[in-house]
Each structure stands twice: as C-alpha cells, then as structure tokens.
Image (spheres, rainbow, N blue to C red):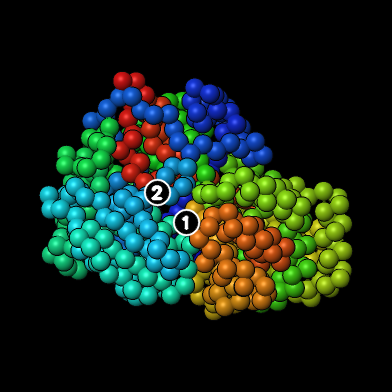
C-alpha cells in the first residue's frame, strides 16, 4: 500500500498556486499576475492540463532542482530521476493528467474473483534496443520491484503469487482483496524493465554511461555527471510520437533556478518550491500553470506529551491561521485545507470527496473566528493546558519558519505556551524517520504527498500499528474501516468508507492539516502542452511539450 513521504525525499508534487486570474484562452496560465502581489489562495483554481501544443520543437531545456542520484527507480526513488524517467520508462498502468488511472502496457485487466488480477500484456512494443517487450519481461520486472531490498517492495505485501499464465498474460493473486494495487502499477511498481539490459548493466544500471532499459517515447541519449542529462525521441515508439525531439535537463535550486528561467537560459520547470513560483510571478515571457496534487502542509504531533491529548490537538487546529500561513509563508500559492491529502488524490468520486472536504472546514477553518477561538479555549480548559511549552520542530526555510511562528501564536491565543526548535535541514529530515531524533519535539512542521490518486493511500497512516502514527492514536473502528476500504474494489463503496475514515482522522487531529500544495508548472510563454497536475511524475509530459503556434 502507499505510504506518504516528505516531497524532497521522494516523489514530490511540485508546489503551488494561484490561478483564478487565468483567462479562458490560456486555460490556467496566470497571465495577469505581473504585479507580484500575493495570490488569493481562497480563489485558487487548478487545471490538470495546459492548452494542447500545435508546433513541433527541436530542443527544450528543462530544469530539475537536483541531479538524479540514479535512473534506477527501484534503488533510488528520487523526484529528480522520476521527472526524467517518466518520459523514458512505461508502466503497466498510466496515471492520467486528471489523476485517473488507465491500463497502458497492460491492454486490459480481468478480475475473475476479488483476489485475482489477470493482465494482458500489450503486443507490438519494443524496448529502446529494438527487442520486443514480452510477458517474461513484465513478470521479471514485477518480481524485481517486489524484492525486499527495492523501493517498491511494500506495494507487494499483499501479493500471494505472480506467474505467467499465457503467451501475453500475467496472473497476480492476493492474500486479501486489494483496491489500490492497480494504482500502484501506475507508479514505480508498474515499470516494465528490459530484463536483458538491466542484467547486462549489473550494479551499474541507472548510472551515467549506462543505457536505459525501457520502452517509452524517449530514450536516454546521454548523462554527463555534474552537468546535464539528455533524452531523445525514440523513432520506434509504438504510441503517439513526441512533439519535442530532444530535452536536455540541468539542475539548479532556489535563486539559480529562478535566474535561469528569468534570463531564458531554461525553457521550463516543475517548481518544487512555492517560493520559486512566487518569485517568477512578475516575470514577463513566463506562464505559470497550477494543477491538482496529493501534497499537503501538515502538523504531525508526537506522543511526547504536549499534544498527546486530542482535545489540545483539536484546539490547535481551530486556532491556527491557515490563510495567514498561505499569504506570509507561500505568497498565497498554497490553499488552506481541512484534510491531510490534496485534491489530486480524488482520482474517482470527485464530487463526493469535494463535498466531504467542505464539511470538515469547521474543524480546520481557514481563518479562525471568535467562535472558533472560544471553542478552542473551552477544549484546553477541559483538558488542562500542558505544564511545559509545546515544542515545535522546524528548519529555517521560509515557509516552515512562518508555519512555526503561526503555530506558536495560535497556542498562545488559547492559553498554551509554545517554543520553536529550529534545526539544520539535514537534521530536520531525520525527524521523519528516526523516533529518537524527534524525541525532543511535540509537533513537526511537515510537508507530505502520496503517490496514488486515492485518499486511502494515506489513511493507513492512522492505523494503530502504523509507524507514521506518532501520537499513538488508537481506534478499533477506524482500523476496521481502513482495512475494509483497502479491500473494497467498488469505487463508490470505497469512497463512502474513505469519507468516514477521513472524518474520524481529522476529528481526532491525528495530524493537523494546514494547506494543500498544488503543482506549479513554469514555462516559456511560447510553449505549452505538458500536464499541470502531479501526473508529471508518472506521465510522459515531455511528449506533449511543443510550441503554441504551428
């Protein structure tokens, strides 16, 4: 099943957004925000796609925030590598720009019963070395992903067996019904490798100088370590041919990335920092598009003491100024939000999830009212204010600093002392994975995403035995309904369970949601075409990049 993670460390949604200012002709481009004033997050509009390109492009120059550690996503699942490889490697299923999921290298899927998935492997597909993609490659790839030492091993925990049952057929059997497995196959667990190429490269696979082992619209043309990485259109591709012939990737962060885009040294980027997008809003010649993602800003309480009582957590959720955080910390480019999962997770039953989200605003208001604060103070009085200050863990980045100060102010407004503990970014990263590292804090200023377009890819984190349930939340009914939802194949029935689980999670303030963090695409205004949603991490976005004019 899917577990969330901080965006910098893994598959990150890029950040975020204004967009009500879009004109109809630009379908989401922020073309009138040239004055540089903060966006109005309350009027945020997200679009999954950009206008279709009409003209071909010989070369494009794209920016990443880091050089990939490896192009073997089984061993190094970084967002930088994924932004490149989603154009090179294909998966059994494919995440669409609207965050729905469709069969891809699997042309169809059958479920003879609720514990069996039969996949038919697409015919006529070749890898970039010209060899045919076979069912044997698919089975070998699935077993490689499932290896306990690989990044995607947790997606296969419910798999009982995987075998080839026909010339182009793979049958997967589960220990229990699994509603999210096909969504995992639209992620890295579904990549189909060329067994021969991976085996020939050995331990060097995925490093500079090695060939790729994939079948996508682009092939790896070269990787100069420390300088650049280039992909080129694959002439033997079975599907629609790319509009852009060649894409060269370089990497820069913060001010260097902004300067490269402002001066025209680069054509585009998916911004992983809201401050990058904010800094470019006043730049002529650049369009910005904002799309749905699963990412969110959250407060993650620990069981250390200060926020152990759910009444104190609920009080903090009622008192924190989410609108102020959005404006001061992120230029309005995040949207106050009442759940810990962004709207990009609504890959099905969107109206139902949207309605449920609105009902939870009362537990996580964008701007606290006098009544909200009165209710928060009442909760603190009933619980008893903690004797010691609530310690807020953060690093010194602009957004987190603003959040930490807003949390301390909210605590003070309801009669609870707050204290900020600022640590270097490297140490801050350890808070996520090491219980000892976070032993001295009561709440972490966090940012998280999930890789699947299904809210149930997140709520397993509230299970009593989850390693991400830091505060020790225990609710037998919650556990039962989460497990039921994860095994419910019918989307409508699963959504009904998910909405109930979501309400229980937010009501108990297991985590305290602050804002959803949409994707931001920054692009030379002569160009268009790529998706604006989080799908850019799993969908061949470069193949649709081109010129606005034919």
Q: The residue tagged with tag 1: helix, strand or loop?
A: loop
Task: Bin the neighbour count of mark 2 within 10 Å (Cα to Cα): few under 14, some 14-19, many 20 and up.
Answer: some
Q: Is residue 156 visible?
A: no
* 66 left or right of 238 in image: right
| Rendered location of residue 419, percent (x, y) | 69, 66
Foreground pick, 318 / 156: 156
Q: What's the residue at 32%, 59% (across, down)?
A: 119
Looking at the image, is mark 2 or mark 1 nearer the viewer? 2
Label placed on residue 452: 1
249 vs 17, left or right, is left
Query: Farthest residue toward the top?
Result: 550
Residue 77 picture location, percent across and down: 36, 61
Taking the image as shown, residue 440 lies to the left or right of residue 137, namely: right
Tag 1 or tag 2, which sits nearer the N-term? 2
Q: Residue at x 16, y 57 (%)?
A: 210
Residue 281 higher or lower than 208, as above or below: above
- Residue 7 to residue 275: above or below: below
- Which dot marks residue 102? 2
Q: CA distance from mark 2 to mark 1?
A: 13 Å
Residue 126 x, y percent position in the rendering? 17, 49
Q: Against 331, is 145 above or below?
A: below
The quadrant of the image that shows the C terminus is top left
Residue under the point 50% across and 28% down: 27
Mark 2: secondary structure: strand
Picture coordinates of residue 409 (x, y %)? 75, 57
Local packing at callout 1 (Cα closer than 10 Å; few below 14, some 14-19, many 20+) is: many
Of residues 221 and 147, the one nearer the viewer is 147
């Amino acid at each position: 099943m899917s577990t969330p993670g901080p965006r910098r460390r893994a598959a990150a949604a890029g950040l975020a957004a204004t967009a009500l200012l879009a004109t109809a002709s630009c379908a989401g481009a922020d073309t009138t925000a040239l004055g540089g004033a903060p966006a109005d997050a309350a009027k945020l509009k997200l679009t999954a796609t950009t206008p279709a390109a009409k003209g071909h492009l010989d070369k494009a120059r794209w920016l990443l925030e880091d050089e990939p550690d490896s192009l073997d996503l089984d061993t190094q699942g970084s967002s930088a590598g994924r932004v490149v490889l989603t154009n090179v490697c294909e998966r059994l299923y494919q995440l669409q720009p609207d965050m729905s999921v469709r069969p891809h290298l699997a042309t169809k899927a059958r479920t003879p019963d609720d514990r069996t998935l039969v996949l038919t492997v697409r015919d006529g597909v070749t890898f970039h070395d010209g060899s045919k993609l076979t069912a044997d490659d698919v089975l070998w790839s699935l077993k490689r992903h499932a290896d306990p030492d690989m990044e995607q091993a947790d997606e296969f925990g419910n798999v009982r067996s995987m075998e080839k049952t026909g010339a182009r057929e793979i049958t997967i059997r589960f220990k229990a019904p699994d509603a999210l497995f096909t969504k995992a196959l639209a992620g890295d667990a579904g990549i189909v490798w060329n067994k021969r190429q991976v085996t020939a490269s050995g331990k060097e696979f995925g490093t500079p100088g090695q060939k790729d082992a994939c079948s996508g619209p682009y092939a790896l043309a070269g990787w100069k370590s420390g300088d650049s990485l280039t992909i080129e259109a694959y002439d033997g591709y079975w599907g629609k041919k790319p509009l852009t012939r060649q894409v060269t990737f370089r990497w820069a962060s913060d001010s260097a990335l902004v300067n490269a885009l402002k001066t025209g040294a680069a054509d585009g980027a998916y911004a992983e920092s809201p401050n990058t997008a904010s800094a470019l809003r006043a730049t002529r010649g650049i369009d910005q598009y904002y799309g749905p993602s699963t990412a969110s800003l959250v407060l993650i309480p620990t069981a250390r003491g200060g926020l152990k009582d759910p009444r104190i957590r609920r009080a903090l959720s009622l008192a924190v100024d989410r609108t102020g955080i959005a404006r001061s910390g992120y230029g309005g480019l995040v949207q106050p939000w009442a759940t810990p999962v962004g709207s990009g997770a609504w890959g099905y039953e969107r109206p139902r999830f949207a309605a449920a989200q609105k009902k939870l605003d009362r537990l996580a208001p964008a701007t606290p009212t006098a009544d909200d604060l009165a209710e928060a103070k009442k909760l603190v009085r009933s619980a008893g204010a903690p004797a010691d200050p609530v310690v807020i863990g953060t690093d010194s980045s602009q957004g987190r600093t603003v959040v930490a100060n807003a949390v301390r102010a909210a605590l003070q407004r309801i009669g609870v002392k707050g204290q900020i503990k600022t640590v270097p970014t490297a140490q801050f990263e350890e808070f996520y994975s090491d219980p000892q590292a976070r032993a001295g804090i009561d709440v972490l200023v966090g940012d998280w995403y999930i890789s699947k377009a299904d809210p149930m890819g997140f709520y397993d984190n509230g299970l009593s035995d989850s390693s991400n349930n830091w505060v020790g939340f225990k609710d037998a009914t919650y556990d039962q309904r989460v497990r039921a939802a994860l095994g419910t194949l019918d989307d409508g029935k699963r959504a009904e369970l998910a909405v109930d689980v979501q309400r229980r999670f937010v009501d108990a303030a297991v985590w305290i949601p602050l804002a959803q963090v949409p994707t931001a695409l920054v692009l030379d205004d002569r160009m268009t075409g790529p998706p604006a949603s989080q799908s850019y991490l799993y969908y061949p976005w470069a193949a649709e990049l081109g010129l606005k004019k034919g």
